[in-house]
Image (cartoon, rainbow, N blue to C red):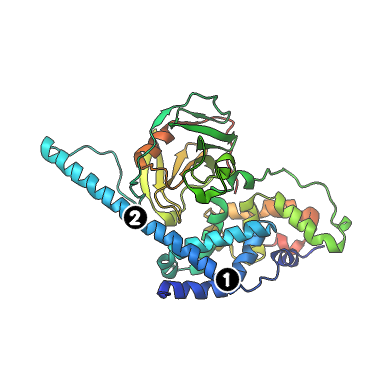
């Protein structure tokens, strides 16, 4: 009979102390991520200010507040307003994947991968961000989500500590949030009755704000044979 | 020049990185490369959210959640990581595994588990976390932890044998 703890202990390994180089590299990665987040938050705040002025002007000229269906922000980080020009959505004309149906895709994008657990959409041609790998390697790899949109079905909703904005798509409640190292990208967790959560992850630098993410999400339909991703 | 966040983070990495690598290695069923990726991703997220880490009522819990999120949220290797699971492990009697290959047998068995089930097992039976802390790390209910660990043990019995001490937990 095997002792499970000892077996796991052997697999875990000795746990060597980190080298100074590793520590510096960890620190450098953290600093870069923080700088990127602050940069985009600053840009987002500016864009938000412009939008607020525009809304005030609209109010002054019409004499009535614009109606809004958005719900109050929950605690936690709100999706930043993107300063990039969003790619517009167009009707999807390719073959429908088995497990999901898709109404709209970003213009110039293709459905790169699909199975019963999810979809990956990517722009045609190389990605804009050269840090994603040599040439267009990341773009041609459906296992990579860098610079893309990933759609999956899973058991759990948004991690509570991330907060985010409560939204609604097709009558279903959702949370639009960002994972800890996302900057202008966002992740939508949409509850699907009896099916779990549809998760739509929009990578940074795509220029998509809430409107585009929700519009895209409204065009995703979960079929009977869709299965939940594990891990 | 290092600021206070850098100093604190530096100390954290010095004292905690090795442990994170060990945990990540278990969570990935012995995949050292993926474990290192997970640790790097986790540390980056922790640095960005450092004030929240410092404020957390349960900093260890925060770190565990971040590590599990790094394992499950992503994006970069989602397709590759979604290992196909099988209902049952291949038939293999414990007695047929030579002693020197026990770790390999366990590693292979762990790899067959869905990642979150594997994580539940690791937190409960290696780190001895209680059900509540394991549920907190995985972001699921305590009932899910119990059912996941029970199913994990069922699947591992071909390798670890029918160990009664595990059945009591």
Q: Position of residue B168 (x, y in %)?
A: 69, 62
Query: How many tags in the picture?
Result: 2
Q: Position of residue A131 (x, y in %)?
A: 51, 51
First along the sequence among labels 2 and 1: 1
Considering the numbered disc 2 on the image, is that residue within a helix, a strand or a loop? Answer: helix
Determine which of the numbered discs, if any, sits on residue A21 in the image: 1
Determine which of the numbered discs, if any, sits on residue A41 in the image: 2
Q: Residues within 10 Å of mark 1 (few under 14, many from 20)?
A: few
Q: Is residue B106 left or right of residue B72?
A: right
Q: Residue at x 82, y 62 (%)?
A: A1
Chain at tag 1: A
In the foreground, B52 or B131: B52
Considering the numbered disc 1 on the image, is that residue within a helix, a strand or a loop? Answer: helix
In the image, residue A161 above or below residue B9: above
Determine which of the numbered discs, if any, sits on residue A56 in the image: none
In the foreground, A67 or B6: B6
Q: Is residue A13 left or right of residue A229?
A: right
Q: Position of residue A199 (x, y in %)?
A: 49, 42
Residue A185 seen in the current view: yes
Q: Residues within 10 Å of mark 2 (few under 14, many from 20)?
A: many
In the foreground, A203 or B59: A203
Chain at tag 2: A
Q: CA distance from mark 2 to mark 1?
A: 30 Å
Residue found at the far front of this picture: A135
């Amino acid at each position: 009979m095997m002792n499970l703890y000892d077996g796991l202990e052997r697999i875990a390994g000795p746990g060597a102390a980190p080298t100074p180089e590793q520590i510096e590299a960890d620190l450098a990665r953290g600093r870069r991520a923080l700088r990127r987040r602050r940069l985009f938050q600053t840009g987002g705040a500016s864009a938000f200010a412009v939008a607020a002025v525009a809304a005030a002007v609209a109010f002054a000229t019409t004499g009535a507040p614009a109606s809004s269906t958005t719900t109050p922000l929950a605690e936690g980080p709100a999706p930043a307003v993107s300063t990039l020009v969003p790619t517009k959505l167009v009707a999807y004309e390719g073959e429908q994947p088995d497990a999901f149906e898709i109404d709209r895709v970003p213009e110039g994008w293709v459905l790169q991968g699909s199975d019963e657990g999810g979809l990956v959409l990517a722009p045609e041609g190389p990605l804009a961000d050269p840090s994603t790998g040599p040439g267009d390697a990341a773009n041609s790899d459906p296992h990579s989500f860098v610079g893309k949109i990933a759609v999956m079905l899973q058991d759990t909703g948004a991690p509570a500590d991330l907060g985010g904005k409560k939204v609604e798509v097709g009558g279903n409640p959702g949370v639009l949030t960002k994972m800890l190292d996302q900057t202008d990208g966002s992740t939508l967790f949409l509850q699907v009755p009896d099916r779990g959560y549809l998760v739509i992850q929009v990578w940074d630098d795509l220029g998509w704000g809430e409107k585009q993410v929700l519009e895209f999400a409204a065009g995703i339909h979960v079929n009977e044979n869709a299965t939940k991703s594990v891990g | 020049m290092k600021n206070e966040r850098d100093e604190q983070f530096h100390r954290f990495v010095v004292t905690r990185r090795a442990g994170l690598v060990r945990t990540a290695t278990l969570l990935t069923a012995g995949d050292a490369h993926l474990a290192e990726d997970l640790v790097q991703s986790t540390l980056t997220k922790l640095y960005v959210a450092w004030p929240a880490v410092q404020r957390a009522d349960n900093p260890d819990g925060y770190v565990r959640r971040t590590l599990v999120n790094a394992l499950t949220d992503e994006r970069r290797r989602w397709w590759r990581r979604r290992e196909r699971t099988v209902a049952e492990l291949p038939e293999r009697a414990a007695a047929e595994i030579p002693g020197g290959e026990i770790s390999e047998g366990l590693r292979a068995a762990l790899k067959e588990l869905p990642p979150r089930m594997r994580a539940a097992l690791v937190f409960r039976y290696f780190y001895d976390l209680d059900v509540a802390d394991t549920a907190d790390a995985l972001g699921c209910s305590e009932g899910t932890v119990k059912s996941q660990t029970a199913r994990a043990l069922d699947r591992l019995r071909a390798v670890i044998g029918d160990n009664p001490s595990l059945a009591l937990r």
